Amino acid sequence: MADDMGDGRAIRVVIGDAELGSGAAALLDELVNEKVASRLAAQDATLWGPDAEAEASIRLSWTTLYTTSRPLIGQIENLRAELRAEGVDRVVLAGMGGSSLAPEVIAATEGVPLTVLDTTDPGQVADALAGDLRRTVLVVSSKSGGTVETDSHRRIFAKAFADAGIDAARRIVVVTDPGSPLAELAEAEGYRKVFLADPHVGGRYSALTAFGLVPAGLAGADVARLLDQAAAAADVLSADDADNPALTLAAALGAAHAAGAEKVVLTNTDAGVPGTLTGFGDWAEQLIAESTGKQGTGLLPVVVEKPDAPGFADAGSGATPVAIGPLAGGATVATGGPLGGQFLLWEYATAVVGRLLGINPFDQPDVEAAKRAARSLLDDPDQLGSGSPPSTVDGPVEIHASAGATGDGGLTEVLRDFLDTVPERGYVAVQAYLDRLDDASAALLRSELARVTGVQTTFGWGPRFLHSTGQYHKGGHQNGIFLQVTGAHERDLEVPGRPYTLGTLQLAQALGDGDVLREHGRPVLRLHLTDRAAGLAEIIRAVQDLRV
């Protein structure tokens, strides 16, 4: 990451569209007059109304983390030095949602290696296990410790360490909330180190807590500089004036939503420039979707590959293209500045957008529904089986059609029927319950579907997206249709001490989420790949054939 000036005004927001700027100006004046920025910095829990006050009162410590997280710096440096002295220099992170997305973008932006496990795909987990365990430390990161994916990873790695003759307790580091079941387990098991995070910070606002800093810092990122960057931005972001970048961004997004632009399309426009924020859209995606997507409203983040990708320059009136970097590629809003400052910028702006939309930006009332559905399937193996029988089969692709797809004809016709169900101003969500490394070509489906349909299209790796856009899918604007892609496993992994394998858990998560989406009246089509590589190629071919 390139060195940045200490001036907090290095954080900047530019509105490049005159009409949007006019609408934002009125909201900006309102926010300034109501002293929203300084009240937020003072952790005023009344900003979002009486219904949100109780939750907000225990979720606002993120505004001062650039100060309160300072003691972590020395602890992280000391542990990293100890580990390296023992020949341990490979960091694997087991975490979901805010516990994985922030450290991943910090490590990627800094260019330091961090293996992130936020998957239940047995092949991807097996690949992580295949690394040199004698050089490996596992960071288990969860506010509660009850996150099923993270607990599964902990169990699998603990056994692998033991099988390799390695003291597992010395190779497991925990990040959790004080008094959590995971904290109690860590003490009972004698794990190497327990970092206790601020319990008054929600997961998606936790980038500058131990959840973001510990894994990235152990991997070699300069987390002190990250806090310096946030501190430099704090005074500007808490100021009640029209030059406040957070208020400007919130006003722009709020005005766009009021005008019908309920989607925010995000991309980096400075790729290749030193200091580029690598993967920042994936972090912002969770923050925006979980914070705003509820009560039938919200902003749907759509992360695209580059400024000329389908859905950005041609975003249309239903979406606001936002550049992370210079105002380019058709963007109407751009944000700039160093990573630590941008974390704080987007957290401030998202919280303020919650006020503008009249919702509580700190709860996630619909996330638990998919978890309950998955648990129900795991508790009834006969019900789970291998899923319902396919409607039809097209080569290596089993087609599981439901509402919105007839199942008649080949794959192209099924997709055509399914995509015809997109409502006006709706969106397509591609959900790939696959290996995001070995099956990376699945991500091509986003741009191909967006190009063919002209419809805003999101892409998420399952179950990663369940802790991110999953809230919006059930609680936000109900105009999405959902394409699930699942796949056969060449190998599966037992979860020690649990009556299921990773592959079984992965399928239960897909089927459970699909059931919840159908209960919300949304069309769901599941394509199961009996051969992953061949099946993905067949789906992409079928999508391209839709042009004919």
Image (spheres, rainbow, N blue to C red):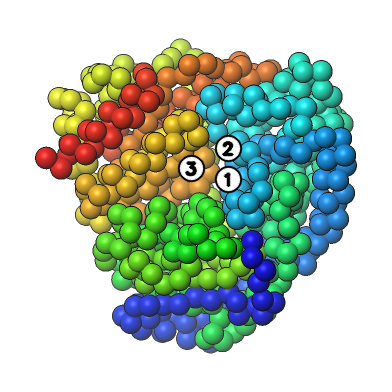
User: What distance separates the C-alpha of mark 2 from that of mark 1?
Assistant: 8 Å
Question: Label 2: which residue?
Answer: 118
> Residue 322, relative to residue 21: is it above or below?
above
Within-10-Å neighbours for mark 3: few <14, some 14–19, many 20+:
many
Name the residue carrying label 1. 97
Label 2–label 1 contact, CB within 8 A: yes
Residue drawn where x is 47% and y is 64% of the image: 270
Q: Position of residue 210 (x, y in %)?
A: 74, 52
Query: In the picture, residue 232 is in which quadrant?
Result: bottom right
For the N terminus, the quadrant is bottom right
Q: Amino acid at mark 1?
A: Gly
Q: Position of residue 159 (x, y in %)?
A: 73, 20
Q: In the image, what residue occupies the spot 52% across and 63% down?
A: 273
Instruction: Identify the element where label 1 is drawn.
Output: loop
What x and y, as percent, mark residue 9?
60, 80
Locate residue 22 relative to residue 187 in the image: left or right: left
Q: Which residue is mark 3?
A: 465
Q: Which image quadrant for residue 235?
A: bottom right
